[in-house]
Image (cartoon, rainbow, N blue to C red):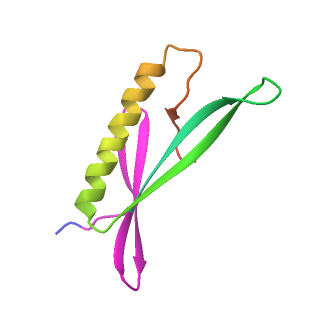
Amino acid sequence: MKRVRFPIVVKRGSSTVKIYRDRKPEGIYYRVVYYTRETQKGEDENEKTISKRHRMNFSDLQEARNQAEAKASWLSRLEGMLCGFQEVTVTSMRER
């Protein structure tokens, strides 16, 4: 059996979603993490970009992989749809 190394990186286009493994006394769980970036107008009419980290927890690795693939595809499609517009509300951001 091949050893699984973490974090697992799921890529679709330029979008990246990562799966981390965490251990607690209750057992092992898997965390799916992705980032979105939102552009908002401030009080002084200047636009500012806010990055948000989204996390979901799963007890099954296959379920976490399925959700990570779905989110990566969604982020990639969303990024493609909004690519030509000036006011982009949500795009993917790579973890640094």
Residue 5 location, quadrant: bottom left
Q: Residue furthest left?
A: 1
In the image, residue 89 sits, relative to residue 35, either above or below, namely above
The residue under the point 49% across, 13% down is: 84
Residue situated in front as seen by the camera: 22 or 87: 87
- Image check: 27 left or right of 95? left
Q: At 41% from the left edge and 28% from the top edge, which residue is drawn?
A: 78
Q: Is residue 45 magenta?
A: no
Q: Nearer the viewer, residue 95 or 80?
A: 80
The magenta region covers 3-30
Q: Give the answer, above or below, for where 82 lies relative to 56.
A: above
Q: Main secondary structure of the magenta part?
A: strand
The picture quadrant where one finds residue 47 is top right
On screen, 90 above or below 25? above
Residue 14 painted magenta: yes
Q: Nearer the viewer, residue 15 or 55?
A: 55
Q: Position of residue 19 (x, y in %)?
A: 38, 57
Residue that lies at the very extreme toward the front in this rendered image: 43
Please, which residue is most extreme toward the bottom here?
25
| Residue 96, image x, y percentages | 58, 48
Q: What is the tally of numbered marks visible in this picture?
A: 0
| The one of 90 and 23 positioned closer to us in this rendering | 90
Image location (x, y in percent) of residue 45:
78, 23
Q: Quadrant of the N terminus?
A: bottom left
Residue ID at (80%, 30%)? 43
